[in-house]
Image: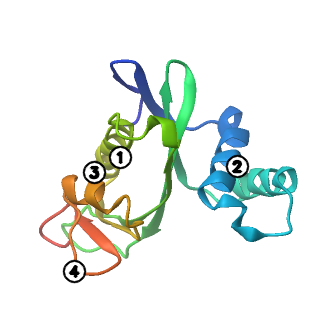
Amino acid sequence: MRGTRKFDAAVVRRATEADVRALGEFRWEFKEGGGSSEDRAAFVTRYRAHFSQNPALHWVVEDDGSVVGMATLRLAAKEPSPGKRHDAIGYLTNVYIKPQYRGRGRGTELLSALIDDARSRHVELLIVWPSDESRPLYRRLGFSGQSDPLKLILVEDGG
């Protein structure tokens, strides 16, 4: 799916330039400032430059009109194979739901839309390095593996 998906009060959609500040703020929260001496405003400015210079598929989930979560999918192109349409593998990163919205299904909604979109783009598999807290979510969505990274095979024939 490449559009917008609605779930009760939530909307899942591709991020736009208008979302970049919120995405930078979420990244700061997600990494808790990283104990860095870089101030938050400088980081958000740097994130904005990164967003525009590094193409990726950024997604957001809104709840009652406010962006409350994000996810990023970075695609790595595969060499073409005869008769196969599996053009890429995907690295899932930067998945974050604001703490007060966790446990409400927003992460599931966000990742389900992203996974559907990856399938429509002929992505063969997704990989993710989950936090301990998010590991059960990825398992429920079908990701597997004994250790990190976890993977979700979207195409069984390995094209």
Residue at the spot x=32%, y=36% of the render? 105
Q: Report the residue marked by disc 3.
A: 119
Residue situated furthest bottom in the rendering: 147
Residue 96 x, y percent position in the rendering = 50, 50
Q: CA distance from mark 3 to mark 2?
A: 27 Å
Residue neighbourhood size for the residue with mark 4, other residues' Cα within 10 Å, grouped as few (<14), some (14–19), many (≥20): few
Left of 110 or right of it: where is 156?
left
Residue 59 in sight: no
**Among the two numbered marks 3 and 4 on one chain, the one whose residue lies closer to the N terminus:** 3
Cα gap from disc 2 to disc 1, whole angstroms:
19 Å
Mark 3–mark 1 Cα distance, whole angstroms, equals 12 Å
Q: Which mark is residue 51?
A: none
Three-letter code, disc 4: Gln
Where does residue 116 sit, x and y in percent of width and height? 29, 44
Q: Amino acid at mark 3?
A: Arg
Say left or right for 77 vs 70: left
Residue 121 image position (x, y, % from top left):
34, 51
Q: Residues within 10 Å of mark 1 (few under 14, many from 20)?
A: many
**Residue 100 visible in the snapshot:** yes
**Quadrant of res 17:** top right
Circle 4 residue: 146
Q: Earlier in the sequence, mark 1 or mark 4?
A: 1
Q: Which residue is mark 1?
A: 111
Residue at left offset 58%, top offset 25%:
66
Looking at the image, do the residues carrying marks 3 and 4 touch, with CB atoms under 8 Å apart?
Answer: no
